[in-house]
Amino acid sequence: MKQRSLQTLYSYWNEVRAGRLAPQRLDIEPSRIAGILSETFMLERVDEATFQFRLAGTRLCELFGTELRGKNFLEGWSREDRAAVEHVLATISKQGAGAILAVEGASDTSHRVELDVMLLPLLHAGNRITRIIGAMSATSSPYWIGTEMLRTRRLKRHQLLWPDGRPRTTAEGAVGRPAPPRREPPTIRLVSSDRRRFRVLEGGRAGSKLDKH
């Protein structure tokens, strides 16, 4: 992962998780990830078709040229991409997976940039996964970023992450159950996909406020 934001978020999330299926929403302390808040966001699962931004960092709102809070993460994709993203979000919500998405954003003038997006589950509202914390970071810094807004997005690749090395049962049946002890030290696994590689942590530690709802 080139993106410091994704690496930092994953390491902090996994530390706070402490072997559970996922951290509690109220376990997250914004001050611990202050350096990446501009590229951090949080989603609320309203229903299967609505994952609403509860907050989004200033950098992300600048990239898309709009205030993202209140908007549905599933809006703005093609039908095929939306189906794939819905499946990813459902797996996160039901099984506690994490995910990395490679997304191509484009401006009206056809300038394009690739974004890496990380999505990680949080327990909330009766120990169910109804929140997802994420980070989004551009893989490069073209000269036009900040002056031209991203109008379209296209899913290029996606990868599910299993922090304990394997899926668990559904989230409802596994809340609070620690993972089996791992004998090996934390490692970083490189997952090849097309022309890029995702670097995935397996276990280990490592301007706006996150809301409390």
Image (cartoon, helix red, strand yellow):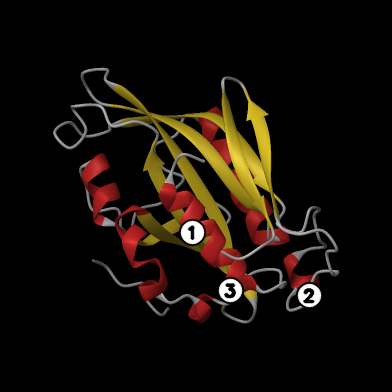
Q: Residues within 10 Å of mark 2 (few under 14, many from 20)?
A: some
Q: Amino acid at mark 2?
A: Pro
Q: Position of residue 113 (x, y in %)?
A: 35, 27
Residue on which disc 3 sits: 16
Residue 28 against residue 193 in the figure, above or below? below
In the image, taking residue 48 as reference, residue 33 lies left or right, namely left
How many discs mark residues in the rendered view?
3
Q: Earlier in the sequence, mark 2 or mark 1?
A: 1
Residue on which disc 2 sits: 178
**SS type, badge 2:** loop
**SS type, badge 1:** helix
How far separated are the C-alphas under marks 3 and 2?
13 Å
If the image is split into quadrants, where does the C terminus sit?
A: bottom left
| Residue 192: quarter of image | top right
Image mark for residue 182:
none
Q: Residues within 10 Å of mark 3 (few under 14, many from 20)?
A: some
Q: Earlier in the sequence, mark 1 or mark 3?
A: 1
In the image, taking residue 111 as reference, residue 122 lies left or right, namely right
In the image, taking residue 186 as reference, residue 10 lies left or right, namely left
Q: Amino acid at mark 3?
A: Val
Residue on which disc 1 sits: 9
Depth check: give the residue in front, 60 or 68.
60
